[in-house]
Amino acid sequence: MAIQLKRTANVSADGVKILVYGQGGSGKTTLIKTLPNPVILSAEGGLLSLADTDIPYIEVTDMLSLREAYQWATESEEAAQYESIALDSLSEIAEVVLSAEKKQSKDPRQAYGALQDTMGEMIRAFRDIRGKHVYFSAKLEKQQDEQGRVLYSPSMPGNKLAQSLPYFFDLVFALRAEKDSEGVLQRALMTETDGLWQAKARTVEGKRLQAYEAPDIGEVIRKLS
């Protein structure tokens, strides 16, 4: 077997891969327009917040369209012109996958097991696309722990999949949208966990992010590149 040695210094050349989660209406879809030259794979259909832009998108309605979108993104000359790919959202894509698995299996446990395998394979495939930034959005999950604290994390169907999701990424941000003392809505990307909100940012030494960054993925990419 031939071994191909690679260099860690070249990892950043593969683009920034990032997962952002938040509550409905926080602006996860709107963040897409801050990506460098993006194309969208949309499973939600909620692109109204981007109506003032002219970003191309592909509708993902079933497993076939998802596989075709991946093939297009990695093999077509047309896709080569785009610097970024946005999957909006992983939570909805997982629901599409789960629906397909339930039709093939009468055992719910088997369907959820297949969901984890299929989504894990799909996330790795899109995450590892070379030379492009890949943005994954996800819904917000709220859970209460044994101490009565409310914990916030990315939402996915199936407990195992939800728990394993952050481990696929070096960058997991919570999009916080809260009103200040004057009632003005403020939005920020939370890059470090506070014990309640799940977040992390494994970055190159000397290119550290702030605990809260402006809601601009393009700026985050510039800081890390």
Image (cartoon, rainbow, N blue to C red):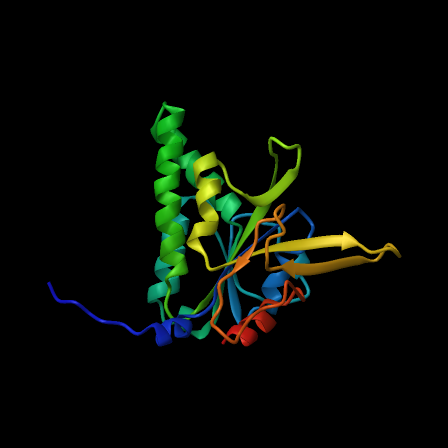
Q: Residue 101: where, in percent of width, then height?
A: 38, 34
Residue 79 appears in the picture as rendered: yes
Residue at the outermost right position: 182
At x 66%, y 32%, the residue is 148
The answer to which quarter of the image holds residue 217 is bottom right
Q: Residue 221: where, in percent of width, then height?
A: 54, 72
Q: Residue 175: where, in percent of width, then height?
A: 64, 55
Q: Is residue 197 above or below residue 216?
A: above
| Nearer to us in this view, 185 or 72 | 185
| Nearer to us in this view, 79 or 111 | 111
Compared across the picture, whether 164 is left or right of 22 comes to left
The answer to which quarter of the image holds residue 181 is bottom right
Compared across the picture, whether 90 is left or right of 185 comes to left
Residue at the outermost front position: 147
Q: Quadrant of the N terminus?
A: bottom left
Residue at the outermost top position: 106
| Nearer to us in this view, 25 or 222 | 222
At x 38%, y 47%, the residue is 120
Q: Residue 36: where, in percent of width, then height?
A: 54, 72
How many marks can you see?
Answer: 0
Residue 60 appears in the picture as rendered: no
At x 59%, y 57%, the residue is 192
| Nearer to us in this view, 202 or 43 | 202
The answer to which quarter of the image holds residue 35 is bottom right
Q: Is residue 23 above or below residue 79?
A: above
Compared across the picture, whether 214 is left or right of 74 comes to right
Q: Is residue 198 above or below residue 98?
A: below
